[in-house]
Image (spheres, grey):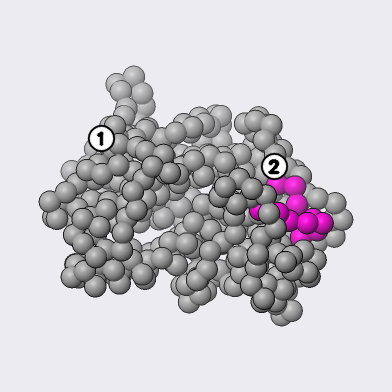
Amino acid sequence: MEPTADDASEPIVASGDTESQEPPKTLVDWALEILSTADPDEKARLGDLAASRWLRGDIPLPYDPSRPARPPPDRPARSADVRLLPPSRMHKLGKGGSAQSRLAMLHSLAHTESWAVDLSWDIVARFGAGMRMPRGFFDDFARVAQDEGRHYTVLSARLRELGSHYGALPAHDGLWDSAMRTSHSLLARLAVEHCVHEARGLDVLPTTISRFRAGGDEQTARLLEDIIYPEEVTHCAAGVRWFRYLCLRSDGNHPTSYPVPGDGTADGKTAREAEDEPTPILSKDVSSDDKMVQQVEDDLPSRIAEDANGQVKATEHVEDGLAKCKLDENIDKDEEAVIRIFHGVVREYFRGPLKPPFNTEARKAAGFEPAWYEPLAVKEACIEGEIIE
């Protein structure tokens, strides 16, 4: 079921090209073509082709430094066959106790993986050149994109085997809406989409697998368990790895955390600089005057949360909140600074606390230790060593 890139049978020019356009030459060119391809099956096929050629060296450059990079679309091309609803109007998926519920779960997974293809190519096209990222960044996210395309392909094929298809049910695009809130900052994009959301997938996949298995669908359970689950660990690892890299990159010839309008450079502080920085770290916005990351340390005088009814109230927390707010004393200075930057970015760009239970084992395999995420599960309570009650 795994798609392949056979040069003898696959065209080089992406389907969105016209005769007046040159075929894609760099990996960023390929990413833009994939983002402009609406059909999800073709999107996955082109992504597999591009990633395979890049990883074996047939695409020589990640981007062309001699010309300005084309910006990616605000919204990738998507198939009109998938009916979209606001998240609030989506029906509950159920717990897999019926064939209908399992189809809804499978369709939701296919939709998520299809968007994950776009997210992976978007981070390459949107940030790779402007942030002057090293080749390893392009390697990692080409692999992630290739995996996500394979995940979509096998899930879509499974839907057809069960007499349905991708697009048979409505879906929502909350994942892309979330991504657009971080379209100005690679650091924020890595934190929210490629650490928080990817790790959340690791948290819920074991339960999802169990539900398919309990419902008698061993084939789907094995597909999720043997193909998708282990690869999702590596995707979370890529997010953590490149978030850490950006924080610690201190070479003056490279941008650091945040892009500046026009030239793709940045003036954000590195983690080492942040360690001694007494004032909030600010960043500049390339697309609007939206508020950027303004805080790394947990130094706000109070925290409040707004409940589902729009009423403002102090958030209630568990008794061990204080312990979770403290970083392990064995963490070295650089890692502690990186983690504090992560906390500040997630608090700014992710709505609400992270929801336990956490898949600690899978997260640890991805290099995502509890000090990164446990304080964020009680983030409204952690105010300079105190718990709000």
- For the point 34% across and 19% down, which residue is it? 20
| Residue 73 in the image, given as x and y percentages of width and height | 46, 31
Label 2 neighbour load within 10 Å: few <14, some 14-19, many 20+: some
Q: Tell me the CA gap for discs 2 and 1.
A: 36 Å
Image quarter of residue 34? top left
Judging by the rendered image, the residue that carries numbered circle 2 is 292
Q: Is residue 334 in the magenta section?
A: no
In depth, the one of 124 and 188 nearer the eye is 188
Which three-letter amino acid code belongs to the residue tagged 1?
Asp
Callout 1: SS: loop
Farthest residue, direction bottom: 330
In depth, the one of 274 and 215 nearer the eye is 215
Residue 89 visible in the displayed image: yes
Q: Is residue 307 left or right of residue 49?
A: right
Q: Is residue 379 above or below residue 120?
A: below
Q: Is residue 299 in the magenta section?
A: yes
Label 1 neighbour load within 10 Å: few <14, some 14-19, many 20+: few
Q: Is residue 222 above or below residue 83?
A: below
Type of secondary structure dominating the magenta stretch: loop
- For the point 67% across and 35% down, which residue is it? 290
In depth, the one of 83 and 303 nearer the eye is 303
Give the number of the disc on residue 225: none
Q: Which residues are magenta?
A: 292-305
| Residue 375 in the image, given as x and y percentages of width and height | 65, 67
Judging by the rendered image, the residue that carries numbered circle 1 is 81
Mark nearer the N terminus (2 vs 1): 1
Residue 372 visible in the displayed image: no
